[in-house]
Amino acid sequence: MNSRSILRGLLIVLLATMAFGADAADKTKNVFVAGEQSHGWGSHEHKARCMLLADRLNRNMPNVEGVVVTEGWPEDNAIFEDAAAVVIYCTGYTGHLLKPRLEYFDALAKKGVGLVTIHWATEVEKGKIGEKFLEWQGGFCDINWSVNPHWNADYATLPDHPIT
């Protein structure tokens, strides 16, 4: 994962956090869920990257609290009760952390909790979990269709949109 990807993910978290309009006296909580280590040292460092992003939020956004859960989904879901957003960085597809927790996270999403997935955490199977990802965050990486792992865009023009 490069610096741009990390910054994009952080920007999404910040925007999701601001969208929930917490009072200045309240801290808006973002829960970072780091999956178990899936590759060798220095590669796909779920824990380290979640800790870095949460630290950057905590140091630079006085009204935001970044909390990190390591080594997969927590045993106690209470940590999510007052979350504005859940950021997941884990191995995806059939082993995705949300796969066995679709109903639980769907209830959170219906209460307004945002979802940010980083890197392979965007990769899920078509079907029920893919449909939920479309609903929750607008898309997912489909390993047999999505452009993966690299793609060089060559646009002659860009659409008229606030971010272009």
Image (spheres, rainbow, N blue to C red):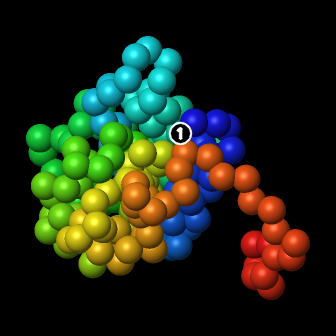
Q: Kindly identify the residue that appears in the image at 88 percent across and 72 percent down.
A: 156
- Viewed as shown, does residue 104 lie left or right of 146? left
Q: Kindly identify the residue that appears in the image at 40 percent across and 17 percent down.
A: 40
Q: The residue under label 1 is which amino acid type?
A: Leu
- Percent across and percent down for residue 146 are 49, 60
Q: What is the residue that sits farthest to the top in this orientation?
A: 41
Callout count: 1
- Percent across and percent down for residue 118 are 47, 48
Q: Which residue is mark 1?
A: 53
Q: What is the residue that sits farthest to the bottom in this orientation?
A: 160
Q: Kindly identify the residue that appears in the image at 39 percent across and 29 percent down.
A: 47
- Percent across and percent down for residue 77 are 16, 51
Q: In which quadrant will I find the N terminus?
A: top right
**Residue 12 seen in the current view:** yes
- Viewed as shown, does residue 163 lie left or right of 44? right
What crowding class fits label 1: few (fewer than 14 Cα within 10 Å), some (14-19), or many (20 or more)? many
- Viewed as shown, does residue 66 lie left or right of 133? right
Residue 69 against residue 152 in the figure, above or below: above
- Percent across and percent down for residue 41 are 44, 14
Judging from the image, what secondary structure is the residue with disc 1 in? helix
Q: What is the residue that sits farthest to the right in this orientation?
A: 156
**Residue 62 seen in the current view:** no
Q: What is the residue that sits farthest to the front in this orientation?
A: 144
Q: Quadrant of residue 34?
A: top left
Q: Kindly identify the residue that appears in the image at 23 percent across and 54 percent down.
A: 98
Q: Quadrant of residue 154?
A: bottom right
Q: Nearer the viewer, residue 115 or 82?
A: 115
Q: In which quadrant will I find the C terminus?
A: bottom right
Q: Nearer the viewer, residue 107 or 101?
A: 101
